[in-house]
Amino acid sequence: MNKLTISKIGAIGFFVLLVLLHFINTSVNPIWQPISEYALGTAGWLMKIAFILLGISFLSLGLYLIKKLPNTGSKIGGVLLIIASIGNFLAGIFNTDPVSNLPENMTINGQIHNAAAGLLAFMILATLFITFQFRKQEKLKTYKKSITLLTSILWGLEIILIAVMGIYLSETNGMITPETPIGWLGRIVIVFCAIWIWFSANYLQKSNLKN
């Protein structure tokens, strides 16, 4: 099984498990609680696997880009994806603290998890370098409009999430509470990351088959 297929399977696996957890663990309120909370309750092991699958998805695509595409930009994008994959692996190993925990009461596990979550930014940054390759390399140009649209949507969603989080969290001293309805938006962003990875791997796979 090649790296692109593994990347696509990892992205699909993450999506399927995340959707299932919304039905299995209804104690988590998706309106305001982040997906990391699923790891603390019923079938928490599924959330851990979901994080690891997304990490495998990032890692496989990153390794493919470094090995198979010659340009420096491709390799930078691949390295950034690998860094982001480490964040997913750490998130799958170290549980978050409950959102009700005050910052001064955070555990080591919770601190590592939060730091790991921040590494997702490297994946979003990687999309710029990878998208540029679709516009630059002749064999990838067939898909440049599609990947550019997907990248634009992902960046738009991320900017909106940052803005909304800034507004709500400033009113709650940085604490996630029922008064910070950012849960669904956070879910949309992480799911769209998986969607972007799937399409990117799929386009690269189709392009490889043509040549």
Image (spheres, rainbow, N blue to C red):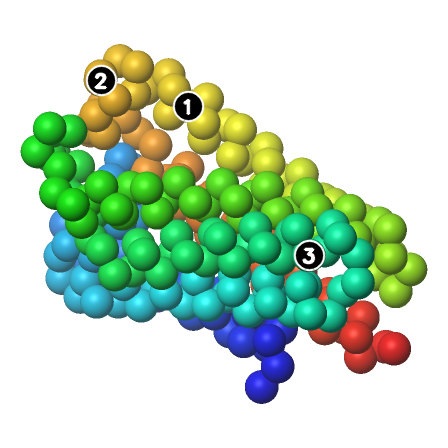
Numbered mark located on residue 95 in the image? none
Measure the C-alpha gap from mark 1 to mark 3.
33 Å
Q: Residues within 10 Å of mark 1 (few under 14, many from 20)?
A: some
Is 167 left or right of 66, judged from the image as shown? left
Q: Give the percent coordinates (x, y) of residue 55.
A: 44, 62
Find the distance from the CA under tag 2 to the CA under tag 1: 13 Å
Q: Residue furthest front?
A: 72
Q: CA distance from mark 2 to mark 3?
A: 41 Å
Which mark sits nearer the N-terminus, 2 or 1? 1
Q: Is residue 105 left or right of residue 166?
A: left
Q: Position of residue 23 (x, y in %)?
A: 25, 60
User: Label 3 neighbourhood size at 10 Å, few (<14), some (14-19), many (20+)?
Assistant: many
Q: Is residue 200 above or below residue 123?
A: below
Q: Earlier in the sequence, mark 2 or mark 3?
A: 3
Furthest toward the left, the residue is 105
First in sequence, mark 1 or 3: give its number. 3
Residue lying furthest right: 138
- Disc 3 target residue: 75
Q: Which residue is mark 2?
A: 172
User: Where residue 2 sits: x, y (%)?
Assistant: 61, 81
Q: With respect to residue 64, does 199 lie above or below? A: above
Picture residue at 58% right of the left edge, 86% below the top: 1
Residue 202 showing in the rendered view: no
Q: Is residue 191 above or below residue 167?
A: below
Residue type, mark 3 in image: Lys
Element type where label 1 sits in the image: helix
Q: Quadrant of residue 91?
A: bottom left
- Residue receiving disc 1: 164
Going 59% across and 36% down the picture, which residue do you hit? 155
Q: Position of residue 83 (x, y in %)?
A: 49, 53
Quarter holding residue 38: bottom left
Q: Amino acid at mark 2?
A: Thr
